[in-house]
Image (cartoon, rainbow, N blue to C red):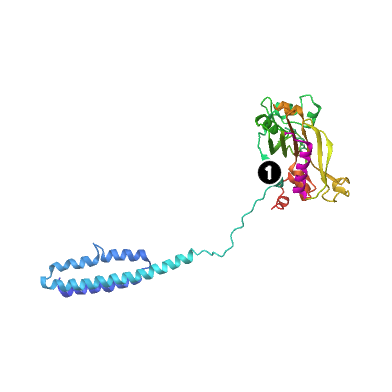
Amino acid sequence: MDLAQLTRDLDALSTSTRAAVEAAPDVAALAALELEILGKKGRLTEILRGIGSLPVEERPQVGAVANVVRRSIEQVLAERHAALSGSELEARLLAERVDVTTPGRPVRRGALHPSIEAMGEIAEIFGRFGFVVHETPEIEDDLTNFQLLNIPPDHPARDLWDTLYLDVPGRLLRTHTSPGQIRVMQSTKPPIRVLLPGRCFRYEAIDASHGSEFFQVEGLMVDEGTTLGDMRGLLDEFAHAMFGAGKKTRFRPGYYPFTEPSVAFDVECLVCGGVGCPACGRTGWMTILGAGMVHPVVLRNCGLDPERYQGFAFGMGPERISMLKHRINDLRLFLEDDLRFLEQFR
Ligand code: 2NL
């Protein structure tokens, strides 16, 4: 090995490497090439091993050439690396391009069922008068659902409520929310102002217009010296808030075993304004709820002294309230879950 040969070898390596670097298709190939030429066991190292056989005075010259060759190889590697990685990034950006102006997939917005919406409105209005929403069990017992409400086992009024009994003795699905009010009176010292919205159950032959589940909202106020006049004023406020200020209202005599006296509460027909039309059966009035003064027997059943405490209670169906308010003429729409109907309540 002599100086001239070593120098030629280095030049040859430089030239061939340059060509290989230019031909490298990607960054990975470039890295492999770098290892092959400049690595510890690479070809440059291999050539430089020949230095040992040169005379001592010639060695620095080869070292100098070797350094120039190494630096120039490093430089072309770096340049090619920059070019390749640039175009690779470019290609990736292109392939993974996201069009941020594409409209998103529409999200289907839900809406409250009109029964639920009506219950919320009712609760909001009575809330202004201090009535607090109370939720009580859907599974009840005969005592609380009937007997304490002055509906004894053989009372003819029981025929009004065809009851769904559980296969647990004495347990039934509540036929109204009234047993919840019994529980409130049993556990709370007056003054009481509660509102009980909830699901109720009756055994009905299921057809297009009857389901076995429905909602009810009941209210109860008990205090010393509570009168029928207080109830009248409160229900007027409710009717005006729900159906419009200034609407005429009236009490008619009614009957419930748990109230005495009992009334039906009517508002002037929202379609004809009281003149009489098919919507109100030509009476000019629409019934919105039933109510009455809590029967003294019921108060006593709950441990309250009727000489000291009086109260009134009322009950309504949120579907009926919603029908009157939105002029809906068919109860079945509330049971069918038809989106063409439900989507109108947004
Ligand atoms: C209606 C009529 C009514 C009551 C519910 C009640 C509850 C207790 C005591 C006395 Cl604990 N009364 N509730 C009173 C009168 C009428 O509901 O037509 N509901 C749909």
Tell me the quarter of the picture where residue 61 sits.
bottom left
Q: Position of residue 182 (x, y in %)?
A: 70, 31
Q: Which residues are magenta?
A: 224-244
> The N terminus lies in which quarter of the figure?
bottom left
Q: Position of residue 228 (x, y in %)?
A: 79, 37
Say whether residue 239 is magenta: yes
Callout 1, which amino acid?
Answer: Gly
Instruction: Tell me if I can see residue 279 in this picture.
Output: yes
Look at 46% across and 65% down and name the residue there.
93
| Residue at numbered disc 1 | 127
Residue 195: quarter of image? top right
Per the picture, the main secondary structure of the magenta-coloured stretch is: helix
Which structural element holds mark 1? helix
Crowding near pointer 1: few (<14 within 10 Å), some, many (20+)? some
Q: Is residue 268 left or right of residue 165?
A: right
**With respect to residue 186, does 39 lie above or below?**
below
